């Protein structure tokens, strides 16, 4: 599977040596990586906007309470709610496996594991993450964006935008938009990942698109959330 851009994986591993091996392996498959040497360090990197991972990979040589709490802490932030977190451990203890899944890990891998199997699992997890949360409320907007394409934005949520463009875009491709409307969120320009594109029922050479933000900073996410909640309140008041 080839992705439209280099997906970033945050590796959480207390061992510098092990983290280096995992990082080099993932990079050899075309992924970019960042490393945190504890769940505390990883949480700090996420909250400070130092990293914007597509996936988090946690090495669990000796599972502890902090590791089991980690997924819940990450997913409690709306910005990271949909980021998949995978665990790898030397223990095949069924209790730990069940607890890890219940804690929010999307998969639990037992060492040792063949590299090809690991790669297959990582790619499957990343493919499953390419979707917009169906529960996300998208507020209506009506703005145009500057790019090589003709793009009209009709909806905004905390995770992305939807709208129309004048040509079909490939899923997972990345486009950069410049839009006056986005400046209120401290986003004069912004990269988006295309997660859906289909021909509009209205025809006329239009394609309906859905895109998620790439590298959205926490401050911008807060501003978008505030805007969305404000617009939602207006809709409810006039309903």
Image: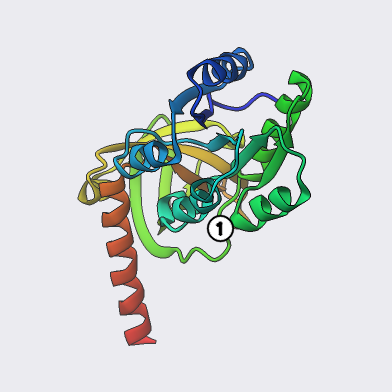
Q: In the image, is residue 208 above or below residue 89?
A: below
| Residue at 61% in and 43% down | 130
**Count the marks: how many?**
1
Q: Quadrant of the C terminus?
A: bottom left
The front one of 235 and 25 is 25
Residue 129 position by quadrant: top right
Q: x, y percentage for residue 132?
A: 56, 53
Position of residue 191 in the picture relative to residue 209 (left or right): left
Position of residue 82 in the picture relative to residue 107 (left or right): left
Q: In the image, is residue 43 above or below residue 161?
A: above
| Residue at 67% in and 32% down | 122
Q: x, y percentage for residue 182?
A: 28, 47
Q: Secondary structure at mark 1?
A: loop
| Residue at 72% in and 48% down | 97
Position of residue 159 in the picture relative to residue 3 (left or right): left
**Crowdedness of circle 1 by 10 Å Cα count: few (<14), some, many (20+)?**
few
Q: Quadrant of the N terminus?
A: top right
- Residue under label 1: 133
Q: x, y percentage for residue 57?
A: 57, 34
């Amino acid at each position: 599977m080839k992705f439209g851009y280099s997906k970033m994986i945050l590796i959480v591993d207390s061992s510098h040596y092990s983290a280096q091996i995992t990082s080099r392996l993932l990079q050899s498959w075309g992924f970019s990586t960042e490393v945190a040497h504890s769940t505390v360090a990883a949480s700090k990197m996420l909250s400070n906007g130092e990293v914007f991972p597509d996936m988090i990979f946690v090495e669990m040589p000796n599972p502890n309470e902090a590791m089991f709490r980690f997924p819940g802490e990450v997913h409690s932030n709306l910005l990271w709610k949909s980021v998949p977190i995978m665990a790898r451990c030397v223990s095949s203890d069924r209790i730990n496996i069940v607890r890890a899944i219940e804690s929010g890990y999307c998969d639990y891998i037992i060492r040792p594991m063949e590299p090809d199997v690991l790669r297959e699992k990582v790619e499957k997890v990343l493919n499953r993450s390419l979707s917009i949360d169906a529960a996300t409320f998208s507020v209506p907007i009506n703005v145009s964006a500057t790019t090589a394409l003709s793009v009209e934005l009709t909806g905004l949520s905390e995770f992305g935008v939807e709208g129309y463009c004048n040509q079909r875009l490939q899923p997972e491709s990345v486009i950069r938009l410049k839009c006056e409307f986005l400046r209120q969120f401290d986003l004069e320009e912004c990269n988006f990942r295309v997660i859906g594109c289909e021909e509009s029922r209205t025809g006329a050479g239009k394609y309906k698109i859905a895109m998620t933000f790439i590298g959205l900073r926490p401050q911008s996410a807060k501003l978008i959330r505030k805007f969305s909640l404000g617009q939602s309140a207006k809709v409810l008041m006039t309903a």
